[in-house]
Image (cartoon, helix red, strand yellow):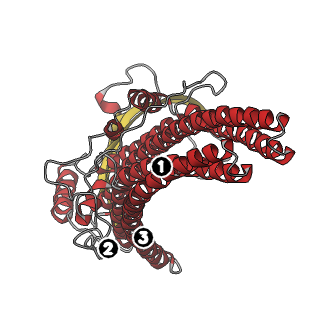
Amino acid sequence: MRIAKTAAAATLGLAFTINGCSMAPPLKTPEVAIAQSYKETAPWMVAQPADELPRGAWWKLYGDAELDALETRLIDNSPDLAAAIAHHAQAEGYTTQLRSGLFPTVDAAASAQRNRQSDRRPLRGAAGPSEYSAYSIGVQASYEVDLWGRVRNLVESGTAAEQASKADLESMRLSLQAELAQNYIALRGVDQQIALLRDTVTAYQKTLELTKLRHDGGIAPGLDVARAQTQYAEAQSQVEQARARRALAEHAIAALVGASVSEFAIAPRLDNIAMPSIPVGVPSTLLQRRPDIAAAQRRVASANASIGVAKAAFFPSLTLSGVLGFQSSSASNWLAAPNTFWAIGPAVLLNLFDAGKRKAQVAQAQAVLDETSAQYRGIVIGAFQQVEDNLALLNHYRAAAESQQSAAAAASQSLEFAMNRYREGAASYLEVTTAQTTALQTQRTLLDLNTSRLQASVQLIRALGGGWSADS
């Protein structure tokens, strides 16, 4: 027994001495060309060290208490977010399972059996009883010595996958928050559209009444009345179309916050949402500010560690095991020293032939690494595109809104001139109709531009990673 213990101790000591190898290649994050600054910058300023998006609650930049309340409801009640949280919990559980491989496994077992052996059992002793009892209790321990880093690479791969899942969760959270903000901005934009159209309906109704009076007085032809009636009915139709769009936006918000669509309602409001000042930073910081980029990078790390797992299969595995317990054919005096049994020793396993299976597994793991590396580069390139896209939209929408404001003012003045000329009999109603159509269209376009600018700002914040960073 002393010799067996000495041999086991020597084997264990040797195992721990070489238990530092790893077959995984050095981790290399794929390189992506990064510019020194964004091309589309004006009028946005490069963020200073103290300028950051609010951590988590980035939507507070818009200064809307109702939006704040809705975002809070989304975080608490969104079914999509709850599903993402549960998915991450699965990843955590899987990583914990892998991490258990770093430690010995200890099992306890007990049994009490009544047995009968065959009279014609091969090599049965003549004195052996036909029926007998068997009682046993004991513990068994086993430990795989991680000679080639197989277990550690499994843990490293699982940990990186768990971290990717955590970043995926944050991406989902940011995506849902941005979608809610966009729908809310769209709803408020439609509120302003409805108010404009209702005012237009009122104005067109008055114009129609004026035209009918002129027609009844023999001043205006029936064609003018028909045109005025057309304008009035068209405006009423546009009001209903806008209300339909508002209903869809309201339903979308209800679904996002986990509320019953049939019972959910947001009261109309006409106040403007403030355009936030967004610190864009420099391109190099984007790699640390987007959770989807972090997730892609961790998947590269997971795939890299998996190569080490695959390569370790070419080398022998060493398992240390031992068992200790009591065994007896009688239930009395069961746990007594003479009934003790034990076994201890190492086991080595080396696969000699597998028809190329292990080589194929290494090639597969390398291909997965190549795939995740390409996906990482694609996500990074796409992230820069999204930032530049939304910077461009904000810049050009701002300039367009300034010009559209002038166009709307000029169109309103033209409408006033046309109405005065019509009342004085100096112009036909066609001139009034044209002026009315132009005035309404310019005002609606201005409202659409303001809504588009706000939505582009939401997308810019999302493209910048919201308030998330790798330090989170």
Q: Is residue 119 visible?
A: no
Q: Write down the residue under mark 2.
A: 30
Q: Are marks 1 and 3 in contact (CB under 8 Å)?
A: no
* Structural distance between the alpha carbons of marks 2 and 3: 10 Å
421 on left or right of 49 = right
Q: Amino acid at mark 3?
A: Gly
> Which of marks 1 and 2 precedes in the sequence?
2
138 on left or right of 242 = left
Q: Nearer the viewer, mark 1 or mark 3?
A: 1
Q: Position of residue 117 (x, y in %)?
A: 63, 39
Residue at x 57%, y 33% (from the top left corner):
195
62 on left or right of 28 = right
Q: Write down the residue under mark 3.
A: 378
Q: Write down the residue under mark 1.
A: 409
Extreme residue in the left direction: 49
Q: Residues within 10 Å of mark 1 (few under 14, many from 20)?
A: few
* Secondary structure of residue under mark 2: loop
Q: Is residue 338 visible?
A: yes
Q: Position of residue 216 (x, y in %)?
A: 84, 34
Q: Amino acid at mark 1?
A: Ala
Q: Nearer the viewer, mark 2 or mark 3?
A: 3
| 263, above or below 291, in the image | above
